[in-house]
Image (cartoon, coloured by chain):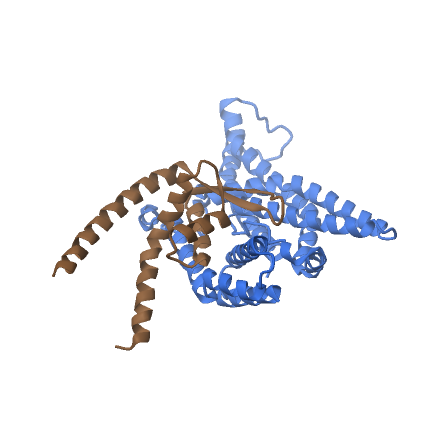
């Protein structure tokens, strides 16, 4: 009975938050569920023969109507967004006056997010390999052991680790790609008993999409790494050509048929290309980062 | 006037008052504690000491204070149940709390002085 009441409350809260950021909804549901269950557990402990339905009614009343609580989340989120947004004057001072959402071709050089995206794309191969290994090992051991009884607890424990890895990847994505992700693990629904808990985990689409994400991160990580290393080396070496040629006299163009063009000219032209290749690399990093952020939101955030 | 409307206005007035004071109270409770505190624990203490708001509105405030850098948090596993989130004041948070507390004292003094005039009239 108390479980249904809590679920009904959470559904109402979710409905009241309809249209909000997914991660905000997940945070709000987490807070509410954690609080309500903690209160109920405290009540049971203080008074063993407690009428839980009556107690929960009081607890819900003290927590507030779903509409009221939802309004508080929306208001506080608006305050934070407003406080953390760049001041309007700062944007106007920029001669380009471009909002950070879409920097100009060279404006990307000043875009902090482009650099963090680049770094994410370069390092994501590391977690990618780890996630893939973990997932494949877990899946094959779970399936293999399923013949024996021990396979079932093993599979359940493995799916638990998948959710933890998904949460940590979410934190990384938020920090480096600037996409808002859940800040907490979804409630474990401690009061419901382990059978319901496990069933809920198995039924929840997010568990499986997280597993898919972990597998997907290997090919994606390798692709990102390849693209970014290639783009970085091409653009940086183009940019370095005139320096190496004029300052260090290190570049020889022997063996290149340039139609008799002077080596100095070749160096200058390459350097000129480099000036465009570097921002292009950052644009690609930014674009891939946004795509990856969108993918992470789709596969790692529940609801 | 419709008594329902009066009630509505009263609630609205309380809500507007709470917009700032709840954050101040949460930070003050955290400043008293020598150790980081669990969110639910903070909510329970405020419920006892300053029952001015629905508990459900305390959590978004805690989160927003964290997003603004006035609090920081760490998640720790608990003996029973889900992992718990512990909050504590940051250096910026302490500075903000000192400034806000001062503002609150000034405001409440001024308001009380005016309200006192009303009582005498």
Expressed as whole percent of the image width and height from the top left, the position of residue A228 reads: 60, 41
Query: Residue B85: x, y in percent?
Result: 53, 45
Q: Which of the chains is brown? A: B
Q: Is residue B3 left or right of residue B47?
A: left
Q: Nearer the viewer, residue A20 or B50?
A: B50
Which residue reaches farthest bottom? B2
Q: Is residue A84 left or right of residue A235?
A: left
In the rendered image, residue B6, in percent from the top left (x then y), is placed at: 29, 71
Residue A127 placement: quadrant = top right
Q: Is residue B60 visible?
A: yes
Tell me where residue A205 appears, x and y as whole percent. 67, 60
Is residue B89 shown above or below B57?
above
Query: Where the N terminus of chain B falls, by quadrant?
Result: bottom left
The total number of labels drawn is: 0
Query: Observer-nearest residue: B63 or A162?
Result: B63
Which colour denotes chain A?
Answer: blue
In the image, residue A51 above or below residue A144: below
Q: Nearer the viewer, residue A220 or A108?
A: A220
Quadrant into which the C terminus of chain B falls: bottom left
Q: Residue furthest left?
A: B121
The residue positioned 34% from the left and 38% from the top of the image is: B95
Q: Nearer the viewer, residue A95 or A13?
A: A13
């Amino acid at each position: 009975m108390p479980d249904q009441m809590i679920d009904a409350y959470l559904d109402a809260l979710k409905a009241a938050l309809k249209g909000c950021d997914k991660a905000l909804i997940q945070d709000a549901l987490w807070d509410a569920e954690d609080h309500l269950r903690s209160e109920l557990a405290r009540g049971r402990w203080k008074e063993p023969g407690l009428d839980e339905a009556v107690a929960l009614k009081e607890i819900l009343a003290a927590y507030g109507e779903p509409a009221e609580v939802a309004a508080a989340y929306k208001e506080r989120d608006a305050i934070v967004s407003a406080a953390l947004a760049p001041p309007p004057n700062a944007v106007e001072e920029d001669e380009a006056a471009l909002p950070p959402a879409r920097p100009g071709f060279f404006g990307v050089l000043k875009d902090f997010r482009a650099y963090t995206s680049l770094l994410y794309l370069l390092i994501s191969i590391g977690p990618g390999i780890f996630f893939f290994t973990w997932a494949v090992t877990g899946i094959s051991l779970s399936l293999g052991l399923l013949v024996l009884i021990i396979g079932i607890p093993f599979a359940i424990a493995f799916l638990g680790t998948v959710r933890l890895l998904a949460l940590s990847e979410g934190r990384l994505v938020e920090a480096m790609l600037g996409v808002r992700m859940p800040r907490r693990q979804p409630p474990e629904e401690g009061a419901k008993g382990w059978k319901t808990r496990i069933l809920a985990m198995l039924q929840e689409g997010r568990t499986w999409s997280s597993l898919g994400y972990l597998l997907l991160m290997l090919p994606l990580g390798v692709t990102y790494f390849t693209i970014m290393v290639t783009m970085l080396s091409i653009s940086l070496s183009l940019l370095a050509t005139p320096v190496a040629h004029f300052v260090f006299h290190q570049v020889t163009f022997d063996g290149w048929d340039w139609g008799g063009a002077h080596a100095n000219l070749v160096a200058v032209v390459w350097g000129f290309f480099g000036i465009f290749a570097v921002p292009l690399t950052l644009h690609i990093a930014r674009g891939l980062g946004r795509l990856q952020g969108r993918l992470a939101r789709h596969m790692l955030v529940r609801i | 006037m419709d008594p329902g409307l009066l009630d509505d206005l009263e609630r609205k007035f309380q809500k507007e008052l709470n917009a700032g004071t709840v954050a101040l109270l949460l930070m003050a409770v955290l400043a008293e504690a020598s150790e980081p505190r669990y969110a639910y624990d903070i909510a329970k203490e405020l419920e006892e000491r300053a029952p001015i708001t629905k508990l459900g509105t305390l959590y978004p405030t805690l989160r927003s204070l964290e997003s603004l850098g006035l609090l920081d948090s760490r998640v720790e596993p608990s003996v029973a149940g889900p992992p718990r989130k512990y909050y504590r004041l940051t250096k910026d948070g302490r500075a903000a709390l000192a400034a806000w507390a001062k503002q609150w004292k000034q405001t409440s003094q001024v308001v009380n002085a005016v309200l006192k005039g009303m009582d005498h009239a």
